[in-house]
Amino acid sequence: DAGVTQSPTHLIKTRGQHVTLRCSPISGHKSVSWYQQVLGQGPQFIFQYYEKEERGRGNFPDRFSARQFPNYSSELNVNALLLGDSALYLCASIPGGGSGETQYFGPGTRLLVL
Amino acid sequence: AQSVTQLGSHVSVSEGALVLLRCNYSSSVPPYLFWYVQYPNQGLQLLLKYTSAATLVKGINGFEAEFKKSETSFHLTKPSAHMSDAAEYFCAVSDRMAGGFKTIFGAGTRLFVKA
């Protein structure tokens, strides 16, 4: 089985632009979570989606949005990019919506905002 | 609010020595606890998880962790370090929130293994 895939792997943007990051979960998994990992820190929770509905949101501004499609893939959108948005963005694939379930992480998308 | 504290941002051990990475959590309810490992330029990989079954949890690559409710700790250990264990380790706690769940990660501990 294929693992979690994320695209693109690397991205360079300038301040004020917007970006769309994509994630394909493991086949059969119905939930995805998004995390931001700034260099030298642990991942910070952004969103959780289950069955195409938002089920959780972290402490991030409205510039961050996401959605999940009928095939359970997901997009994370960030508008009006700031220098501080530079980070590794991780997607996690989860079989269901339970808090005790294992999250399977993709390799991440590294975003650099100049 | 739940939180996770990892004591020591860097830990250095000699190859063959005991590995001990410390994690303390705060939670008002029995938590789900996890340890993840991250190798350079990669995503996170689950080492082990505690979900209220046995308090001593065995994971992959010889790692194990013990849940101690009285100490609110979930320290990660490995009897004998190997060079390939050099990586960043994250402790995490998950809790339900309004129909879904939220996972909080610690700041991480970077493990160095000396030959």
Image (cartoon, rainbow, N blue to C red):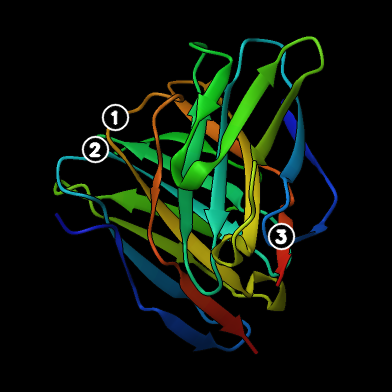
Which label sits in the foreground, 3 or 2?
3
Q: Position of residue B110 (x, y in %)?
A: 72, 60
Q: Do residues under tags 1 and 2 come within 8 Å of each other at their CB atoms?
A: yes
Q: Disc 2 marks which amino acid?
A: Lys
What is the C-alpha distance between the residues marked 1 and 3?
32 Å
Chain ID, mark 1: A
Q: Quadrant of residue A24?
A: bottom left
Depicted B34 relative to depicted B97: above or below: below
Quadrant for residue B91, please give it.
top right
Image quarter (top left, top right, bottom left or bottom right) of the N terminus of chain B: top right
* Label 3: element kind: strand
Q: Secondary structure at mark 1?
A: loop
> Tag on residue A96?
1
| Chain at tag 3 | B
Residue beneath label 3, please? B111
Q: Earlier in the sequence, mark 1 or mark 2?
A: 2
As rendered, which of B100 and B49 lies closer to the eye? B49
How far apart are the alpha carbons under marks 1 and 2? Answer: 6 Å
Measured in 3D between alpha carbons, the distance from the residue under mark 3 to the one under mark 2, in whole angstroms, is 34 Å
**x 60%, y 67%: residue:** B83
What residue sits 52% from the left and 74% below the top? B41
Task: Estimate the x, y position of residue A40 in percent, counting from the top left.
Answer: 73, 66
Q: Quadrant of residue B35?
A: top right
- Callout 1: 10 Å neighbours few (<14), some, many (20+)? some
* Count of numbered circles in the view: 3
> Label 2 belongs to which residue?
A30
Q: Amino acid at mark 3?
A: Leu
Image height of A89 relative to B26, above or below: below
The residue depicted at 65 percent of the width and 10 percent of the height is: B29
